[in-house]
């Protein structure tokens, strides 16, 4: 299945719901959401799913649950607004939350879009194992990291305020002094993903670039989990 791009109405809806974040407005505009937001995101997810499964056959193959819901779960949050104004595709393992899973994602907002991969709430055990792996083979890790950076990906991670690895080589410090691990690209504006466009082909190529580092992350995660 080929994906031709989003509608301008997709982003109009996401912009408007931010200022009309209530059940009554959504009920009146639900058909807009289904046609211009949910349907194209599911179409794109369907087009990308075979390529995601080539990277990791254990990803959840269900299209419906791989696309985020517009309705928020407000049970455990201070923010009680019922709806999101952004939507994402998340390729991850079945019955796992975004925060606990190795994920490849694509997200749209009213102002732009982004994509990438990582383990965004990494456990201390995982991060310690990751650092040991990096220090054991710095040249191998840097080859993976530099290939991503050369293609425009940035290290999407929160750094510690203080250097915790003062004895490590300088070229490794930014990869060690982080709380979690991810890589991404972010774009302002949405005109280049409105139909007709080549976003499907672009994402397929980008996912191929993600594969080696994703495999590196997963290999560490499997070791930590004893898989």
Image: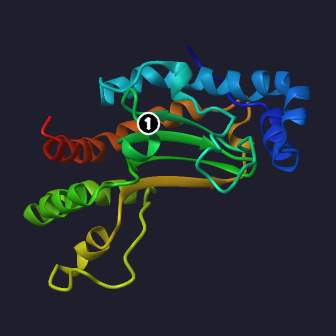
The colour scheme is: rainbow
Q: Residue furthest left?
A: 136
For the point 30% across and 25% down, the residue is 58
**Picture quarter containing residue 141?**
bottom left
Q: Which one is nearer the viewer's eye here, 93 or 71?
A: 71
Please identify the quadrant where the C terminus is shown: top left
Q: Which residue is mark 1?
A: 205
Nearer to me, 95 or 106: 95
Residue 120, how many percent across, how many down?
41, 53
Locate residue 91 relative to residue 188 in the image: left or right: left
How far across and how far down the image is residue 33, in percent? 79, 28
Residue under the image location 41 percent in, 63 percent down: 157
- Image height check: is 121 above or below 157? above
Q: Quadrant of the N terminus?
A: top right
Q: Is residue 66 among what the camera can see? A: yes
Q: For residue 206, say whether it is visible.
A: no
Residue at screen point 86% across, 27% down: 27
Q: Residue furthest front?
A: 75
Q: Quadrant of residue 101?
A: top left
* Residue 23 pos. (x, y %): 84, 35
- Secondary element at tag 1: helix
On screen, residue 220 above or below 26: below
Q: Residue at x 69, y 54 (%)?
A: 79
Relative to residue 158, is residue 171 drawn left or right? left
């Amino acid at each position: 299945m080929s994906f031709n791009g989003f509608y301008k109405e997709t982003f109009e809806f996401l912009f408007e719901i931010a200022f009309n974040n209530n059940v009554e407005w959504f009920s009146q505009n639900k058909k807009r959401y289904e046609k211009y937001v949910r349907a194209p995101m599911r179409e794109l997810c369907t087009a990308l799913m075979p390529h995601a499964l080539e990277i990791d056959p254990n990803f959840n193959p269900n299209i419906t649950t791989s696309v985020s819901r517009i309705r928020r779960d407000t049970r455990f949050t201070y923010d009680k607004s019922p709806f999101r104004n952004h939507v994402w595709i998340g390729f991850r393992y079945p019955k796992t939350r975004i925060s606990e899973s190795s994920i490849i994602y694509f997200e749209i907002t009213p102002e732009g879009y982004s994509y990438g991969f990582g383990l965004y709430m990494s456990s201390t055990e995982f991060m310690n194992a990751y650092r040991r792996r990096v220090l054991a083979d710095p040249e191998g890790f840097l080859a993976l990291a530099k290939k991503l950076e050369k293609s425009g990906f940035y290290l999407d991670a929160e750094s510690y305020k203080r250097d915790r690895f003062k004895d490590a080589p300088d070229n490794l410090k930014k990869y060690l002094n982080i709380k979690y691990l991810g890589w991404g690209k972010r774009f302002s504006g949405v005109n280049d993903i409105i139909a007709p466009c080549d976003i499907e082909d672009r994402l397929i190529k980008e996912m191929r670039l993600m594969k080696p580092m994703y495999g590196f992350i997963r290999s560490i995660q499997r070791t930590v989990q004893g898989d």
